[in-house]
Image (spheres, coloured by chain):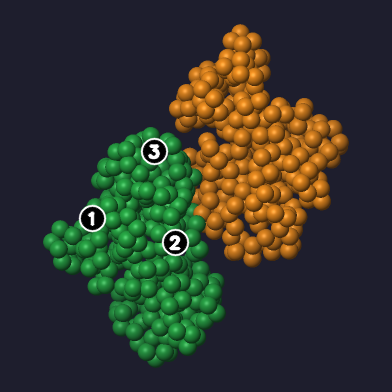
Chain colours: A green, B orange
Amino acid sequence: MITSRLLDEQLGSRVLLKAEGFQRAGAFKFRGAYNALSSLSPSARSRGVCAVSSGNHAQGVALAASMWNTRAAILMPRDAPAGKRAAAEGYGAEVITFDRYRDDREQLVERLAAERHLELVHPYDDYRVMAGAGTTALELLEDVGELELLIVPVGGGGLIAGSATAAKALAPGLRVIGVEPQASDDVTRSKASGRRERVQVGQTIADGQQLSTPGELTWPIIAALVDEVVTVSDQEIVAAMRLLFERCKLIAEPSGACALAALLGGKVSAPGQRVGVVLSGANVDAARFAALVSER
Amino acid sequence: MITSRLLDEQLGSRVLLKAEGFQRAGAFKFRGAYNALSSLSPSARSRGVCAVSSGNHAQGVALAASMWNTRAAILMPRDAPAGKRAAAEGYGAEVITFDRYRDDREQLVERLAAERHLELVHPYDDYRVMAGAGTTALELLEDVGELELLIVPVGGGGLIAGSATAAKALAPGLRVIGVEPQASDDVTRSKASGRRERVQVGQTIADGQQLSTPGELTWPIIAALVDEVVTVSDQEIVAAMRLLFERCKLIAEPSGACALAALLGGKVSAPGQRVGVVLSGANVDAARFAALVSER
């Protein structure tokens, strides 16, 4: 846990930061992937796993598979950043590319799983993945004790579904708030209407959260256990990234900074409260980080 | 302690990073300042302290004084970055400015100490400050156990004098290597000749290490206990900053990255060894960091 007196003074809350950038492979995603691999039968695990992802899930699955000494096949869009591909291959995964505009990625990965008898590891719509991701909140609560509010980024919903499940079991009175980018406010809208809404995803720097609808399995958990979901702008995210860098000496990728952005931007207020904030990952290359924080 | 398997694979050593950016006030300097304040008699401490610094020492002294509920007067050049001044004032220090080109800073701070009956806290040439700084190596060794090599940045020499004292007492066979920027190679030259050499300091991004000669009190300790001092270029420092950012998710200011730069740049080699690397601080604003890592 990382804390900062200056941050606390500025916000008027006691802020406890869970920095998942220091998690293996640089983001919380490894937790879910590793738990999914660990949950497989030995024979299923020995056949290997597959996933479709151009981001942190790819690296999480690749690393978890290498730790279990089994194969991973990762479908990635042909135009994925070279660094992301190299990272997955560095962990020993086989990377198979597809055309992000012409191919149906869900169909491709299901065919791959069937043809090669691989276990498909979904990035969020999988109870094993949610449970693994939820250890983020579990550890946070074990480390800091009592807490009044927990703020968690929301993309597909695996992190917040798992975290809310752990948090509400341990501390039923704890408020859990999700944060997503304004450009992809599907979960906010779904919470308002009470059913899974689908939105047109706009442009946002928060590339880990560009989803058009909540997960089929994550949504009922979010509906039941998450108290509120709020949105933040890209500008608010950049301000949080800059503050984390300068005050806390922490790196967050844009999606990783959105929970703190909600607090800084006044979207969530918790005067005098102890607030757990999940910084979900730190996989942003130095040049992109530099470009983002240089803009005012 | 922060470790990275990717870093270890790249270097062929087991690298154990001591990230002083997470120290209070963002750099190791707080350790020496706090120890100096703690060593004063109650009556001396209640009169207050003074220092001359535009950098991390100013913040360390200001914070230590505020923790001891006493006053600190800090002399800073008039053109010091506004953020540095605000940080010292934020800790409750009085900032007094001087003209870096026309005024004699040593004379000014001594007069200030005499006139106001303040205890002068030197940034390195003070055994209390060296001893405080040396807790960096003490903690590192306590955390990691056996070590074959310890690499430490060198500016005035307080950090390395204290660290080498602690390290050689605990592990006499441990090699201790200092690193300074090429543009300010006074300690390297002094080690070569066996006496305190004075150099013309050139331009370097490593603003914490722009000193023309080793300290009067730090030098004999460096001469006796430090095995070797090597230099690194600004380019090597930037490469280390970028790698720390991307691989380890750690922020280092230029001086803070120089010990790792020596290892990455092949100035120091330790194949198969366990190597402690002190990252001495992380006080670099986001815009400056962005500008540094964007240049190739």
Residue under label 3:
A8
| Residue A220 visible somewhere in the drawing | yes
**Which amino acid type is shown beneath numbered disc 1?**
Asp
Q: Earlier in the sequence, mark 2 or mark 3?
A: 3
Chain to which mark 1 belongs:
A
Residue under label 1:
A227
Q: CA distance from mark 1 to mark 3?
A: 23 Å
Chain to which mark 3 belongs:
A
**Which amino acid type is shown beneath numbered disc 2?**
Ala
B160 relative to A107, above or below:
above
Residue under label 2:
A27
Q: Looking at this view, name the residue that lies furthest to the top.
A: B115
Categorize mark 2 by other alpha carbons within 10 Å: few (<14), some (14-19), many (20+). Answer: many
Mark 2 and mark 3 in contact? Answer it, CB < 8 Å. Answer: no
Q: CA distance from mark 2 to mark 3?
A: 24 Å
A259 relative to B105, above or below:
below
Q: Nearer the viewer, residue B70 or A190?
A: B70
Q: Looking at this view, name the residue that lies furthest to the bottom.
A: A115
Q: CA distance from mark 2 to mark 1?
A: 24 Å
Residue A188 coordinates in the image, percent (x, y): 21, 58
Mark 1 and mark 3 in contact? Answer it, CB < 8 Å. Answer: no
Q: Which mark is residue A138?
A: none
| Residue A236 visible somewhere in the drawing | no
Q: Residue at x 38, y 58 (%)?
A: A137
Q: Earlier in the sequence, mark 2 or mark 1?
A: 2
**Which amino acid type is shown beneath numbered disc 3?**
Asp
Please state if A89 lies on the left or on the right of A196 as rendered. right
